[in-house]
Image (cartoon, rainbow, N blue to C red):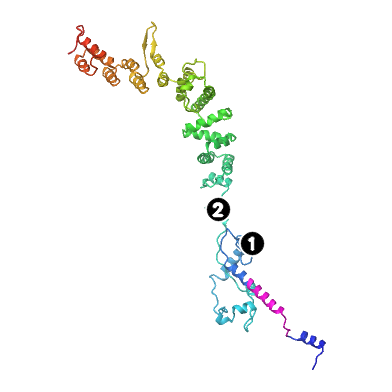
């Protein structure tokens, strides 16, 4: 029976069945994808890596673990469990199992929403059911509770820990900015031990040029560093620091209240010496570059005089400025008087410098002494044996050596030195003065045949006026 068009539309609209459409398959796929995404999101939540550095921990209620609200709820829940459930509750044996054999649930039914003939409560509804208690595994403590066990401290926190006597390694601060922050916070803390500890670390990890530059603008740290170098007797670094301060005109701005009177005098001597060295260095550098001073051409300078010890400075001036008048800064006599150098120390230094230059007339003048009657004689604050050693090391000629070998007081030592340096006249004259004929005869065989020394020995042996011992 033919139905009208209106009857057909009424049939389809009122029927519990729907007509087939090509869109049905697309709707089914969309529902399937949404279900799969829901399951995957739950799986990722369960299997999420427990790494505190990458993600933030949250409780089942969605609140961050470690927050105040989370701590309050956890405390309340713990108290309730203590009152009602003294032990961890056993899972009831009559709780429906989710195994495939008993539940009738399947993966396909989960996706399609089928219950397999049973009333199926969705997974999200189960989770939201307040009657079911979920026990989360114990989570690690927040990182803040491990603060004392790691070295993740700022420069300010590090200084505070050092003040409290706690361990605080400084090696983690590698940049110049962090190191200077450590120093500034240490100075602000007014703790001398902490300042010194930071300065020791900076001395070990920074170049001296950078360290000195930064200390110039930090007077408190500078005073501590000078005191530290003085206590540890690091004289070389102390001299370099003081020389830089002199050059930059900072020395007089430093308050040396850390020093004793003796230390202050020592520092003042260093300043005076450095001031003198700066003047001498500038003058000599200019003279050397000019090429008109003979001694600088014959003996070029090997190093700068700056920061050299006092005796080295005296040796330098005896070598290059020996004949200058006493009123000049570079005069050896001026240095001797200004720094109260002893006669013996001055004598040894001048002797070594002039012997190095082979200036034998200057060497001879060092020993010449004139008494009140006008007579001259050779006098030395040093034993003539040591004088001979110094001259021999500087390749003094035999004629120069025998003048000083003959001044050795002990006869046996004089003969030994004379034989060593082949000063035959000294040996012959000493045996003559000892009236030792046998020794003189024996020495006759050691000189050259027909030499002047052999003829001199023969004349002495034939001299009837000499009373020989044997």
Magenta residues span 17-37
> Mark 2 highlights which residue?
147
Q: Secondary structure at mark 1?
A: helix
Q: Considering depth in this image, is 211 or 312 the residue closer to the camera?
A: 312
Direction from residue 81 to residue 27 in the image, left or right: right
Residue 126 is situated, as x and y percent measured from the top left of the image, at: 63, 74
Q: Secondary structure at mark 2?
A: helix
Q: Is residue 123 visible?
A: yes
Residue 101 picture quarter = bottom right
Q: Is residue 339 visible?
A: no
Q: Considering depth in this image, is 408 or 199 the residue closer to the camera?
A: 408
Direction from residue 201 to residue 128 in the image, left or right: right
Q: Of the residues under marks 1 and 2, which one precedes in the sequence?
A: 1
Taking the view exactly as shown, the residue that stands out farthest to the front is: 450
> Mark 1 highlights which residue?
69
Residue 380 is situated, as x and y percent measured from the top left of the image, at: 37, 16
Q: CA distance from mark 1 to mark 2?
A: 22 Å
Q: Is residue 32 magenta?
A: yes
Tag on residue 104? none
Judge the density around disc 1: few (<14), some (14-19), many (≥20) Cα neighbours within 10 Å.
Answer: few
């Amino acid at each position: 029976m033919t139905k009208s068009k209106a009857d057909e539309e009424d049939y389809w609209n009122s029927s519990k069945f729907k007509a087939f459409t090509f869109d049905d398959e697309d709707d089914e796929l969309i529902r399937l994808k949404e279900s799969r995404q829901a399951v995957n999101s739950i799986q990722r939540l369960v299997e999420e890596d427990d790494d505190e550095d990458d993600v933030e921990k949250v409780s089942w209620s969605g609140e961050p673990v470690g927050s105040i609200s989370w701590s309050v709820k956890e405390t309340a829940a713990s108290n309730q469990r203590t009152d009602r459930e003294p032990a961890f509750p056993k899972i009831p044996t009559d709780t429906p199992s989710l195994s495939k054999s008993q539940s009738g649930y399947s993966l396909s039914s989960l996706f399609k929403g089928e219950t397999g003939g049973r009333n199926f409560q969705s997974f999200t509804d189960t989770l939201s059911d307040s009657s079911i208690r979920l026990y989360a595994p114990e989570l690690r403590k927040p990182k803040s509770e491990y603060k004392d066990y790691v070295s993740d401290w700022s420069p300010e926190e590090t200084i505070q820990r050092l003040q409290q006597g706690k361990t605080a390694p400084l090696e983690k601060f590698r940049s110049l900015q962090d190191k200077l922050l450590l120093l500034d916070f240490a100075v602000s803390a007014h703790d001398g031990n902490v300042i010194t500890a930071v300065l020791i670390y900076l001395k070990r990890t920074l170049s001296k040029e950078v360290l000195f530059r930064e200390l110039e603008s930090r007077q408190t740290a500078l005073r501590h560093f000078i005191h530290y170098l003085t206590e540890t007797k690091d004289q070389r670094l102390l001299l370099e620091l003081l020389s830089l301060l002199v050059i930059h005109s900072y020395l007089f701005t430093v308050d040396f209240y850390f020093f004793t009177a003796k230390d202050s005098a020592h520092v003042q001597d260093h300043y005076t010496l450095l001031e003198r060295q700066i003047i001498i260095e500038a003058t000599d550098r200019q003279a050397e570059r000019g090429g008109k001073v003979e001694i600088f051409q014959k003996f070029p300078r090997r190093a700068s005089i700056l920061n050299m010890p006092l005796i080295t400075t005296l040796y330098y001036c005896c070598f290059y400025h020996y004949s200058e008048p006493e009123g000049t800064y570079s005069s050896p006599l001026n240095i001797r008087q200004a720094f109260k150098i002893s006669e013996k120390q001055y004598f040894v230094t001048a002797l070594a410098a002039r012997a190095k230059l082979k200036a034998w007339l200057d060497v001879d003048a060092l020993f010449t002494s004139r008494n009140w009657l006008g007579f001259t004689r050779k006098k030395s604050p040093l034993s003539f044996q040591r004088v001979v050693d110094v001259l021999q090391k500087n390749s003094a000629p035999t004629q120069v050596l025998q003048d000083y070998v003959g001044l050795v007081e002990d006869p046996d030592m004089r003969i030994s030195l004379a034989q060593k340096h082949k000063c035959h006249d000294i040996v012959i004259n000493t045996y003559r003065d000892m009236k030792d004929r046998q020794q003189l005869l024996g020495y006759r065989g050691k000189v050259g045949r027909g030499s002047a020394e052999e003829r001199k020995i023969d004349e002495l042996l034939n001299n009837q006026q000499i009373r020989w011992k044997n």
